Amino acid sequence: MAKKLSFGAFLTCASAVLALIGLIAYLVNTGTDYYAKMGVDTAVVGCLIAVVVVTVLRFVVGMKGNPLWADILPVCAVVLAVVAMVLLLNARVNNLAAVFTFENSAANMADTTSCIVAIACCVLAVIASMISAFFDITKD
Amino acid sequence: MSNSKSKSRAKQRLWRGLTALTAGFTALALTGSLIVNGFRTDIDKFLGTTSIRVVSDEADPSTAYGYKSDYASTKELVTAIADVAERTSEEGSVLLKNNGALPLSAEEKGKISLLGFSSYHPCVGGIMGSSLTPNIGTDADTVDFVQALKARGFTYNTALADMYEALKASYSTEVASWFGTSTYETITAPANSDGSFFTSKEPSPEALSGVNDGWESTMDDYNVMIVTIARAASENANYTPGQAGVDPSQKLNQTDPLGLSDDERDLIAAAVEAKGTNGGKVIVLLNNASAMEIQELEDNEGIDAILQIGLPGGYGFYGVCDILDGTVNPSGHLSDTYAVSNALSPAAQNYGFLWWSNAQPDKNINSAIVEAEGIYVGYLYYETRYADTVLGQGKADSTVGSINGAWNYANEVTYPFGYGLSYTSFEQKLESVDVDLAAGTATAKVTVTNTGSVPGKDAVQLYVSVPYTDYDIAHGVEKAGIQLLDYAKTGILQPGASETVTINADLQYMASWDSTADNLAGSKGNYILDAGTYYFSVGNGAHEAINNVLAAQGKTTEDGMTENGNEANVKTWELTALDDSSFARSKNGTAVQNQLEDIDVNYWLPGTATYLSRSDWEGTFPKTYSNLTASDDMIKIMYNDNYELQHTGSNVVFGAKNGLTLADLKGVSDLEDERWSLLMDQLKLEDAMIRTGFGGTSTKIIESIMSPEAIQNDGPNGVYSYPLSQYANTDKSSGDPCAIDADDVNGGYRAGVMPLEGTIAQTFNKELAEEYGKVMGNFSLWSNLAIWWGIGVNIHRTPYNARNHDYYSEDPVLSAFQGAATVKGAQAYGLITAPKHVAFNDSEANRTGVATFMTEQKAREGELRAMQSCFEDAHALGAMTAYNRVGVYTDNAHPTLLKNIVRGEWGFVGLMSEDFIMDPSYVALKEAVLNGVTMSCNTGESTMEAVSGYYAGWTVDNVKDDPELTAALKQAMTWQAYALANSNAMDGYSASTRIESVRTWYDNALTGAEIVFALLSLCCAVMYVKSRKEKN
């Protein structure tokens, strides 16, 4: 009998998608004229990739059962998402301060869009992964 | 699934979820702690906390406080600030036109009608930068125009006020950002983007009638009609010259953003028309920092008076009111030329977003400005070309750059530089000018007599006209027909009274840079004085002065002069042979030579630019240089990696144990004192690398030499970044004579209240500029704010720079002397006062990356002259560099500007910060340090890991064996320490002082959160495992 997906499955998917979008947005951001000079923070990229991998793994494993080791995955996802979010903020806070004040221009604001998307996705990924940790992937 | 299994799994999910949640918060607290350390200073500023404590063992701690305030309380302090600000407005507002309408009578004070929304919402400061934060509930609350009118006993038409209030939505500007929408009720400046434009917001008379169709008749009883026309100023904003700078969707017959729109014209016309029935007066207030195009206002006979009030700050409207009712007599004189059409000036031909054809925005290679006007900025252009039309030379009367037909001064200039009216009349008589070339001075005596009927002050403007010779033409040396050499202000002269003013002018400011001349350094480039006749004169502005000179040369209106000059007010001095020795050395003895050949675009792209020459106005008038193509060599330099680290080994001493602290060098101004080198030997290389890399917002403590944290503050409208109490000492037992009570009513007072720099310049009063410095110096003592980026000395190259409010004038001498006076006043109280932006940041367009090109003569006689005195004479202890490129190098990386001119020729010793540059490659850290920059504006954790992570290659291993860079790092930190040692940042420090870390409440909160969440996480994990076992 096909297992029914729980609310947690959707949240888990959401957190993976949000982390992925956040990752893509961050990489897009690092390619914009204004932010290209800041380079790519490998820790941010690594953490976000890890969030996606861990979350997908959790989803796949969760479809098959609930082994003890698999229950550490949502915890890891949350921690990784939090670390990614904080590192991203840390990497960008000076630039955001500059773009919103001394270096405010339409071009720089446009370049900042992807940065804001990346940060927002990280925040949402953290929230989604935290809530999803209270749910299994499938219904009982 | 059975119920029990289901329940068990639900428990597991709960504990797993809680484990994840608490683990997440644990991670947040842990990473948050790391981040907090990187931004600790800024967090402390924001929260008002402190993370360090300075501890001293002195028996009498008051001995550690060397600087004394002139004031016994914060009430006295803020009252003094307000007083200086008000007097600056009184002396810096310029009466441009007056048919006797001003001053107002006592009766007329009760009949004021305020027209124009800017009467109710004036520009008092910059939209961004030098903006005013109102002080409320203090002993010196700030005021706008309406509040000042009320305070000074004026009565105004409330029906009009209500009408404008009802129209607020129509003139408000909403600026959207990621954090929501900000609403400005003042007029705003266009954004700093290519293609941005000005939008007129003035409600039309029809719009006014839509709210109150009888608004004109309300003025029958309030027939003194004051119309305020404003143009905003702002950092990071930009006006585009001409029609392109005006909102294309508006059909308001506005040809320039600094010209009038039909809505503004119609409003004034309505007031003039109303005057026909109510018998009143029409007075126009110009609320602007950039010169506007107002010929039509001058020509409009219905307008009785025009008063330029600048951006008045927090108290300036008191001064405006005092001028309106004649309590004080206006004595301001324009610091800029008011041209009929700003866009026709030679400088405006190359302004704005002029992109490279091969721009690389991701490398900050964006645009280039060729300042092809050469030295001819502002009146130096208008008056020189005028002189040449009269003298019939240089094809000055050609049509190029003219409003219409042959160039004619009367058609081009509305109000000249230095012009201003008074309620009385003065006669100035140039008694004598004694030139002492050996001493480098010209001593002028000028007798000023009040020939009118009311008391007043007058500005004495000493001008010089230097010879323009065949030698100059052959060697590419340009000479202005007239230039300000120095100035002074009289005291208040009673009717009939006289005062003889003595001006000791510095002759170096009439010397010209000749890039071809031999010099004492054995190379090329020197200051010269040509052989010939030098004409000294005075006048109510540059135009009157040149007319006097022309009169002395036998010219009259028959020759095309606008009016006959006064030959008697001219003194001459003859130089029989070209002098290339008097100024071959700077004041500190450095032999001058060409240092900036590479900032001429022709150096890189030969034959590209033609620079304006008065020898041929027609043939050399600037064309626009856009879409230039940078060569590969230029591009390579613009990638900002122009110094290759050496690994030959360094013997520069770091980390010695000599037992000194910076307090031992307190007040020691001789850098040759052996203790300086002993102290700086104690510095660790890591300290120097971290502090140069992360120098933003404050100088952080360096424990190896016990140098203090000193908080940086922006200006120039005052020390404005923080309220008085933010860093004030509230420990009255500390011995600090400027300690305040924790609940001091002025604790929230912000000192960014001054009229903006243009108004300060228009006072032509050095003593007042010095008083401004003094009250800010006093404020720094009470507020413990020791560094002030407070002296904007870029020049008004064109009126289109929306940031002109942060700078004094189009004239370098006026800029330099007003700036130097303020530096002198502020530093007397230990406030490190920094001129900015060194140099050539005369536009905000693409300011991060714009390549600024010009001749060395223009550089030296323009912007560099505008700041030179601040360093040479006032000995500024701080400096801020610029965003822009100097030629193709970033300002900080230019190989000679900062190192050889600012620190070399001018002898600048002090801290030097970059502007707010975030891009680590554009910071060009190693090149900047080599040039004497002591800190970037970035912030981060005070660790090598953090600074190395930000600046690629900035590691101890890479730097420690580079003899040049290690020496430069130590030198930079020595200069920085020198500035601190000679400032009030050392107040409270003694040889026994030590610094202790203090845990703030947020440190405790974070640690608590880490522990609590970690424990909770652990508990939840245990509970999860337990629930799992229950299942099994």
Image (cartoon, coloured by chain):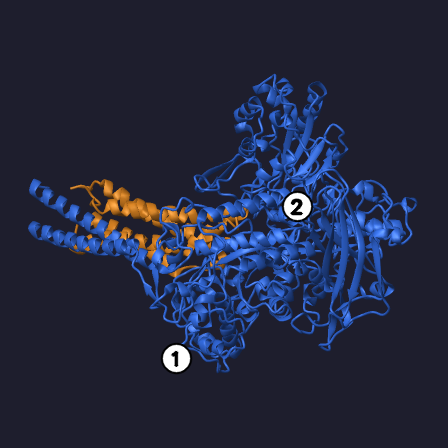
Chain colours: A orange, B blue
Mark 2 vs mark 1: which is more N-terminal? 1
SS class, disc 2: loop
Identified at 39% across, 77% down, the residue is B659
| Residue at the spot of label 2 | B800
Residue pictured at 24% horizontal, 45% vertical: A132
Residue B629 drawn above or below residue B214: below
Mark 2 or 1: the one toward you: 1
Image position, residue B952 (x, y; %): 46, 67
The residue positioned 63% from the left and 46% from the top of the image is B759
Left or right of B339, for residue B759? left
**Mark 1 and mark 2 in contact (Cβ < 8 Å)?**
no
Picture layout, residue B582 above or below residue B379: below
- Using the image as rendered, state which of residue B696 and residue B710 is in the foreground: B710
Position of residue B4 measured from the top left corner of the image (x, y, whole percent): 7, 42
Q: Amino acid at mark 1?
A: Lys
Q: Which image quadrant is residue B827 in?
A: bottom right
In the image, is B321 to the left or to the right of A56?
A: right
Question: Mark 1: which secondary structure?
Answer: loop
Q: Is residue B116 above or below residue B871?
A: above
Task: Tell me where residue B404 appears, x and y as whole percent.
Answer: 82, 40
Q: Is residue B304 visible?
A: yes
Subunit ID for the residue under disc 1: B
Q: Quadrant of the N terminus of chain A?
A: top left
Closest to the observer: B16 or B961?
B961
Question: In the drawing, what numbered circle is on residue B657?
Answer: 1
Mark 2–mark 1 Cα distance, whole angstroms, equals: 55 Å
Q: Nearer the viewer, residue B843 or B215?
A: B215
On the question of residue B850 being in view, the answer is no
What's the amino acid at mark 2? Tyr
